Image (cartoon, grey):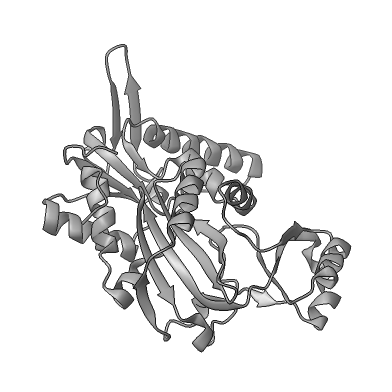
Amino acid sequence: MPQRQPGSVLIVTETGDLHADAVAAVMRDRHGIDPIRLDMRDFPTESGTFRIGASRSERTLSHVLGLDGVGAVWWRRPHRCRVPTGIRSADNEFRQAECDGFLQGLLWSMPAVWVNDPGADRTATRKLVQLEAAVHAGLRIPETLVTNDPEEARRFVKSRSGAVIYKRTGTGRAEFSETRVVSEPDLDRLDTIRSTPTTFQDYIEAACDLRVVWIDGTEWTVRIDSQSGAGRVDSRLDTTVDFAPDRLPAAVSRSLSTLMGTLGLAFGVVDIRLGADGEHYFLEVNPQGQFAYLEIKTGLPIVASLANFLVCGDATV
């Protein structure tokens, strides 16, 4: 993407988001720009207006200044509006839909560079979409079954030659959910997946895990020595192990770029497992993933890279 002239940046996120704080600090220090912050839960307590005519449009929120001058938006941690509730559920649902529709429309209609485009972001968070796209992009994935059928799950687990892991399928902001290896007692509890479709995958014996922060084609790859600590199955469980900068093989990098283009993402945090067999296995990409701890662990200038892209359209540092 060609460089653009620095302009206003809007960060849509929750109050107290440390990642947004870090990026905003770099924007102020390096670019002299103080980004606009918006927590969507402040509406409709705060008022908003959209006006459009033949020649121009105007967007205003009573607690946010300068929306019409925004050149880039970081769709970081959006929320639904926080709408006061009444007695009738039908009225509550109507008000919620109207507020969400208004505020989303007001923002999404802005002629800005989006990181990420909200429509692409929403589609890309669906892990089944990711896996299908990853295969077509040439990435290796573990053999996978996603189902709410207990018998289908049992058959899959018993048919595999090695261990099988299970993990959540959705991407909601629920309590942390650990990836686990299916045990014999788990097979007796599979009836519980009827109301919660679950992902089952071949367990990949690993040399290490990789987390890649992808910003418009710039890759910041971190090697996590997950197999030396408590995170052998789930690398998120132990941050006391060694973290080090790394690089992807060229073929994997090309496939990852194809995947991100297919998903329409300008930004994503990608989890890859380097198998003991030397193969790189794509696990998932989070369009709103966490990355600040990777910079703390390795010194990679990830925050500056994202800030540069939002301000100037260039992720290099």
**Going 25% across and 32% down the picture, which residue do you hit?**
68
Q: Is residue 49 left or right of residue 205?
A: left
Residue 14 seen in the current view: yes
**Going 82% across and 65% down the picture, which residue do you hit?**
156
Asked whether 122 or 102 is in front, the reply is 122
The quarter of the picture where residue 3 lies is top left
Residue 21 seen in the current view: no
Q: Is residue 228 left or right of residue 141?
A: left
Q: Is residue 278 left or right of residue 183?
A: left
Establish if 277 lies above or below 156: below
**Going 55% across and 71% down the picture, which residue do you hit?**
278
Q: Residue farthest to the top?
A: 54
The quarter of the picture where residue 170 lies is bottom right
**Going 39% across and 83% down the picture, which residue do you hit?**
242
Q: Position of residue 81 (x, y in %)?
A: 46, 46
What is the number of callouts on the image?
0
Q: Position of residue 55 (x, y in %)?
A: 27, 13
Q: Quadrant of the C terminus?
A: bottom left
Asked whether 136 or 231 is in front, the reply is 136
Q: Position of residue 232 (x, y in %)?
A: 57, 82
Establish if 297 lies above or below 270: below
Q: Quadrant of the N terminus?
A: top left
Q: Is residue 150 left or right of residue 167?
A: right
